[in-house]
Image (cartoon, coloured by chain):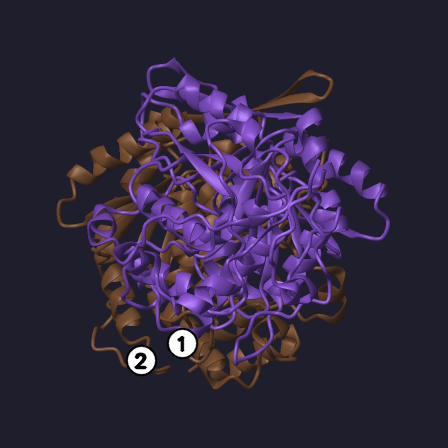
Chain colours: A brown, B purple
Amino acid sequence: MSRRSLTLLKNLARSANGSGIQTRSVTYMPRPGDGAPRAVTLIPGDGIGPLVTNAVEQVMEAMHAPIYFEKYDVHGEMSRVPPEVMESIRKNKVCLKGGLKTPVGGGVSSLNVQLRKELDLFASLVNCFNLPGLPTRHENVDIVVIRENTEGEYAGLEHEVVPGVVESLKVITKFCSERIAKYAFEYAYLNNRKKVTAVHKANIMKLADGLFLESCREVAKKYPSINYNEIIVDNCCMQLVAKPEQFDVMVTPNLYGNLVANTAAGIAGGTGVMPGGNVGADHAVFEQGASAGNVGKDKIVVQNKANPVALLLSSAMMLRHLQFPSFADRLETAVKRVIAEGKVRTKDLGGQSTTQQVVDAVIANLE
Amino acid sequence: MFVLIVMCRIADLLNPRYLSILPMARRSGSILSRLLANPPPSPFTAPTRSITYMPRPGDGAPRTVTLIPGDGIGPLVTGAVEQVMEAMHAPVHFERYEVRGNMRKVPEEVIESVKRNKVCLKGGLATPVGGGVSSLNMQLRKELDIFASLVNCINVPGLVTRHENVDIVVIRENTEGEYSGLEHEVVPGVVESLKVITKFCSERIARYAFEYAYLNNRKKVTAVHKANIMKLADGLFLESCREVAKNYPAITYNEIIVDNCCMQLVAKPEQFDVMVTPNLYGNLVANTAAGIAGGTGVMPGGNVGAEHAIFEQGASAGNVGNDKMVEQKKANPVALLLSSAMMLRHLRFPTFADRLETAVKQVIQEGKWRTKDLGGDCTTQEVVDAIEMASNSDARPLPKFGDWDVNDPATAEGFTVIFSKAGEDKKTGRSTSKTTSQRKQDAKPAVKKWLCFTFS
């Protein structure tokens, strides 16, 4: 029952998105023991990671949220995620992380991808929407990109056939395509979304993306009230920048999802404000929505001017996931109010504030 | 030996507007494209040239170009190009071949024709989604080894978009990468698709990109990759780009990961200049860049190899529109017209290319004749008529060509500069501003009064 109330509340929150202030007409009736504090694994990460996760910690403390963080230091150049971190996540089931910077070129494989594969977090979700008060070139953007997280072009299977010739394997399986399609339609159904669009390049990669499309079509038959259509990825990129209002929920394989999510985040205000998370059957990892591997330049770190909004909104998603909806609402309201007022903004939104100033403003706006 | 001296308008000879072709046609082409990229503000007039084109004897000989109308809106827009070429009396004649996207292979005679003519103009070939036929666009590119695809995404003056100051050239590797077409089903329900990257192909596309930047006075080349995940494949691509970059110290070289690149394109497109990419990323980046600069209906582009060149709509060449557009004939011919202007430069007819581009840009700037994707409601034919009118609107005499047999290339040799019969036109009071369709209606019997002289 609490899952339904969560979605009811999400819809209420979305419908009351216009103004910064929301009045609740629904009473939350907690079950005894719901207030027990939950442990969440926290991975600060590289670059701006420690800065923005610290921001989340401060805000959580100010709200007295029933959350406590178990902090673990992981850096992008490590060869594997340390086993104690994995143990902690398996125990807590929920993790919040900053970005892990993957070195370009040979050597270490991406720890972001490794986390997702080991914990089988097969769906990555980014909600790209126009924030009131933040002017962008595109209006009426409200796109959720659901991206398959474990296979596809990110299989990591490459080899050098002869010197100077490299083969990289893109693996698509029916199992993974089916479950991501099922997740996408389930998300659309639970969140009252009208349309699901599958993004593919099956005119060129006929077998691989063809299999993905078949799985999507099969699942679509079970949800007759939701519109389903397909779009080729190059046309999709152009439509995104020309008419983004035509898209609602988009389900994509791994690589296209990465690009489409970044493009959609860019048109809606930038990757500094879009919340997102990775979810699997048992675990969930919340991080900045799109471009999680982008940990900013040294200058941003030195001047402490990173944008904490994305991670704050993702931690609100996390609070809902942990079934603390009232704290989640308070946090989202405060963040959206700060953005709508427009006085305290970091550089990527056109302002000049530091991270700490934004955090203070959010804390001041908490009810 | 005798020399035919005939009456010619001396004024035309001395007219500085009568352009002649420098031997270094390729550089002048690029200079012109830069000049035309920044046309003078309204009222829009044809640029006055300070360079005189001096053609070499025989340069006016007509060239044959293979024409593949294609599927969907293809025949419509290639028809538009043919009309405009005829109205301009361009020394190009088309060999048309019917190819459809659902054929299994490109027919042999088409490949032969392209190999013979070296230049091809085509509409889109719609590749069926799913199993069966492989893409004919790809097949053409692979067989003729047309390894570089070029799209120039630039804000067209008069066309308001959400993004300003966009001037991006996307150079995309055309033959390998994710489009190698090597897929197989390992067990039912598990498919592997091979992405192949070779040093040879990466090096030549990098060399082409830097050469393009050098020849066109571009300041920056950006390599787009995802080498943090695909370390060996995109790592090899990056290595090749870095090696070539060392040979061009005057050009700034940087790299960007493709997901960040997509976001930067929609946030701050003015930071990009020339972008060199492998196959798939190039497709997506080109489409995104075309979208922010005005749409794929207006961006010119081409595919070039060491020996052959194919010109088609810049980005999204496989997108042939929906049936409604074909029925209502409302496809946008601008992209293919600008690509045919690129083709005219490639064939060393820069005057015609200039006239065509000027006319097209004038029509877009005026804003009265626009198809649906640009916010108007015109049909293709209306846009074509407007462009024809714009290209003939100045009173500059049109060169016409003498008697040649298009099926016999030998008759084209030996002809040199040919002068117009504009004087005749003025005497008979015939207006030069009629459209081709109108002209066909009141056509006089073909009286060939051409003036030419030959050197003995």
CA neighbours of label 1 inside 10 A, class few (<14), some (14 to 19), many (20+): many
In this rendered view, identify the residue nearer to me: B260 or B388. B388
**Same-subunit check for callouts 1 and 2:** yes
Considering every residue shown, the one lying at the far left of the view is A224
Relative placement, left or right, of B324 versus A80 is left
Dividing the picture into quadrants, the one containing residue B1 is top right
Q: Would residue A247 be seen by someone viewing this image from the given angle?
A: no
Q: Whole-percent x and y of residue B448?
A: 44, 48
Q: Whole-percent x and y of residue A82?
A: 64, 37
Mark 1 and mark 2 in contact? Answer it, CB < 8 Å: yes
Dividing the picture into quadrants, the one containing residue A61 is bottom right
Q: Is residue B327 above or below residue A313?
A: above
- The residue type indicated by label 1 comes to Thr
The tag on residue A284 is none
- The residue type indicated by label 2 comes to Gln
How far is mark 1 from mark 2, CA to CA?
8 Å
**What residue is pinned by disc 2?**
A22
Considering every residue shown, the one lying at the far front of the view is B2
Q: Is residue B278 above or below residue B417?
A: above
